[in-house]
Amino acid sequence: MKTKYIHIILLCIGLLACNKEPQQFVIEGDVKGTTSPVVCFVTWHDSNPQVDTATIKGGKFMFSASSKNIQSVVIYFEKGSNWVTAWAKNGDKITLQGDVNDPEQILICGNATNELLTDFKQNHKDTPIETLLVDAEEFVKANPASIASLVVIQDYMKDNIPPNLLDEYLRLIQSPARENWLYARLVTR
């Protein structure tokens, strides 16, 4: 009889462990062009920035942190002279590949937000501003619920179109992107 109860208890413990949500996200990098062995990460906790570091060995590094909601992780290379932004939440495994001296072309993969942004940047690295703006507008219309659209608005549209037109594109944004801090910052610019 005791054996039966022990098996039931072990089964329950196993089921509880399987249903547990991941408590962290992981960012792994494989980069070239580094002269500084330190990479810095800035995350946000309760509206306060938190700075962490990792060591780059053989071009590789790893960082983990916790965030229930998707958040920006600013990654600084070369003592802060080059940086990229990744987006992550608990359970994500984000990968970075590329040359730190060309941060716009670093490939960031691991979730839909990073992959949409990486594809957009890769497809528009030599695009004239007029074409870029048209493509950015189409991107926002095609991805209104993605934080990637907010990043495209911030990085490509905000300083290149009239404020009233920018407001029109911000009105297209839907949940869950509408709840992100970047949406509030763009609306109150």
Image (cartoon, helix red, strand yellow):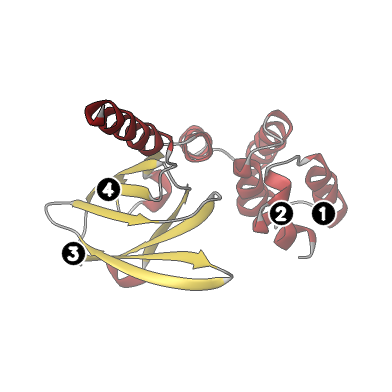
Tell me the kind of residue under disc 3. Answer: Thr
Report which residue position mark 2 lands on: 183
Q: Residues within 10 Å of mark 1 (few under 14, many from 20)?
A: few
Report which residue position mark 4 lands on: 29
Considering the numbered disc 3 on the image, is that residue within a helix, a strand or a loop? loop
Q: Is residue 53 left or right of residue 48?
A: left
Disc 4 versus disc 2: distance between alpha carbons?
Answer: 28 Å
Report which residue position mark 1 lands on: 162
Tell me the kind of residue under disc 1. Answer: Pro
Disc 3 versus disc 1: distance between alpha carbons?
Answer: 41 Å
Q: Which mark is residue 35?
A: 3
Give the residue drawn at x 79%, y 43%: 169
Q: Earlier in the sequence, mark 1 or mark 2?
A: 1
**Observer-nearest of 171 and 26:** 26
Q: Nearer the viewer, mark 4 or mark 3?
A: 4
Percent across and percent down for residue 25 are: 39, 48
Tell me the kind of residue under disc 2. Answer: Tyr
Q: Is residue 56 left or right of residue 173?
A: left
Evaluate if marks 1 and 4 touch, with contact meaning CB atoms under 8 Å apart.
no
**Observer-nearest of 9 and 116:** 9
Considering the numbered disc 4 on the image, is that residue within a helix, a strand or a loop? strand
Q: Earlier in the sequence, mark 1 or mark 4?
A: 4
Quadrant containing the C terminus is bottom right
